[in-house]
Image: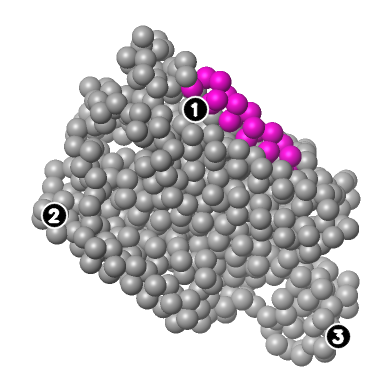
Amino acid sequence: MKETTNQGHPKGLWVLFGTEMWERFNFYGMRAILTLFMVNSLMMKEADASLVYGGFLGLCYLTPMLGGFVADRFLGNRNCIMLGGLMMAAGQFLLFISATVFTSNLDLAKILLWVALGIIIFGNGFFKPNISSMVGSLYPKQEKNKLDTAFTIFYMGINLGAFLGQLICPIVGDVKDAGGIRDIYAFKWGFLAAAIAMVIGTMVFFYLKNKYVVTPEGRPIGGLPSKNDASDFEEGESQKAVFSKNALIGAVVAFVGLGFLFHYAFGQNIIYAVIYASGLSLAGLIISDTSLTKIERDRILVIYIVAFFVIFFWAAFEQAGSSLTFIADNQTDRNFFGWNMPPSMVQIFNGLFVVMFAVPFSMLWDKLRANNREPISPFKQAIGLLLIAVSYFIIAHNVKDLGNNGLLAIKWLILLYLIQTCAELCLSPIGLSLVGKLSPKRFSSLLYGVFFLSNAAGYALAGTLGSIMPATGDKFNKAKELGIDLQAVLDKKIVPTADQLALLDTNQISPTNPVFAGFEIHNLFEFFMVFVVLCGIAAAILFALTPKLKKMMHGIN
Ligand code: GLN
């Protein structure tokens, strides 16, 4: 029995589309309100919330290694998806409880936050790699040419979910009254909506998988590994990566050494150090494998080089849920056609624009390919980096003259998300398919692991960069109410008394400007220029490397 739609895509694709849509609803809906909840209800400083956010997202992209491994060896994709879905729903439910009890017991609320985030991290690790790999498994060898379109459709499901989550969770969870005063008790409804979405997603998958998520012959896809028929595997897929004992010991030693280096020499917190060290040691383990031919090694090096540059992209892109949300909250005129949009909802434009532009972008690449003018993937990724630098350059110039009290017009943030979405479409789906094309089959899932780890490193860097956001308008106003001239304090023109310092601290205001790489960040203009410089330099180097990378790809584009 072959369950296909008119367009020739298996019906299973729509089951995976729906499941992933609800899962991303849960993830991005929660992401929209998470940092605001930490700052407003749990009384954390914005810089700390950014660091937690970066570490959380980073770990969400570290655990897919585990989820992929457990699925391949023990549980199979299907069980891991359901396990991951239930874990994420439970995590969201704990966030709901945390956002319910914080007034009576702040310490308990914080503990619940850590436990919830921990459960979501593992849930995401079980869910995310397995649903993506099932998309690939839906297509038999002779239909692999449909994969690009399949992943474009799937990417739209991801972003339709993100859009819905970022619509509903802010509406119910990020509530301000007409005077702009936030209801700090409302966040719980956002987390509850996310939990319900995840339960729906898991149920959709549970009830529809046996009928639709099947091979063209009607056999279930992603069952227990031992029950998988040998013909479920692609040619060469059984050739698992086998590393020598020495190589594995070397990788563990490198992991520990690098972890210490990042933690003690570069001052990174343990979580960030683990993320950076795992990426590098896994990359080293694969490239040192003696079975690799020269061509294979060259191609893997291309993946590594691209993965390195992608770090800067995600570090800039993932400001959406932290610094950009804080700015939308504290220094933006959010009047959107007469409606005052909740600050956490402004990031919705990313998901919306992906849904609108994913198909036109894939048609653009098809057209260029037909005319033999399609750029190679690293070039597209350099365009992505350049575009994100441009998006921050525009916003930097719009915050330049705001001073401490002016408001940024929401249209500039919408434009930023429009440009960043075009950047994402040049870089994210392209990167995933590039890894698939360049990886020797036996290292494919591990190289996806390295690639996801570069996403994780980008998210960790996003946390660090988000934490260097200088004081926004609300801080200056609050300090004024407290009788403190914050600008003079930051400019070191007056030295605050111990009482004033304590007052600033209880109001989550830092008395000093943040510092990045030895540079003091005095205002939002300088903050945004950090992203312009980092992504601009990364884009320029990647453009310059393109001819060399083209050679190293040995005929793959
Ligand atoms: N927004 C996409 C998703 O949620 C891509 C994220 C990524 O690859 N880092 O799946």
Q: Return the x and y of residue 191 as percentages of the image width and height.
A: 72, 43
Q: Dot 1 lies on which element?
A: helix
Give the alpha-carbon distance from disc 3 to disc 2, as whole Å. Answer: 66 Å
Q: Amino acid at mark 2?
A: Ser
Does mark 2's beta carbon lie closer than 8 Å to ligand 1?
no
Q: Main secondary structure of the magenta part?
A: helix
Q: Amino acid at mark 1?
A: Phe
Q: Which residue is mark 2?
A: 291
Q: Which residues are magenta?
A: 190-209
Q: Earlier in the sequence, mark 1 or mark 3?
A: 1
Q: Is residue 207 magenta?
A: yes
Q: Return the x and y of residue 154 as percentages of the image width and height.
A: 45, 31
Q: Amino acid at mark 3?
A: Asp
Q: Dot 2 lies on which element?
A: loop
User: Does residue 190 appear left or right of residue 276 in this picture?
Assistant: right
Q: Which residue is mark 1?
A: 17
**Residue 499, numbered label:** 3
Where is residue 341, by image quadrant?
top right
Q: Is residue 200 magenta?
A: yes
Task: Single out the residue that lies furthest toward the left.
Answer: 294
The quarter of the rendered structure image containing the C terminus is top left
Give the alpha-carbon distance from disc 1 to disc 3, as whole Å. Answer: 56 Å
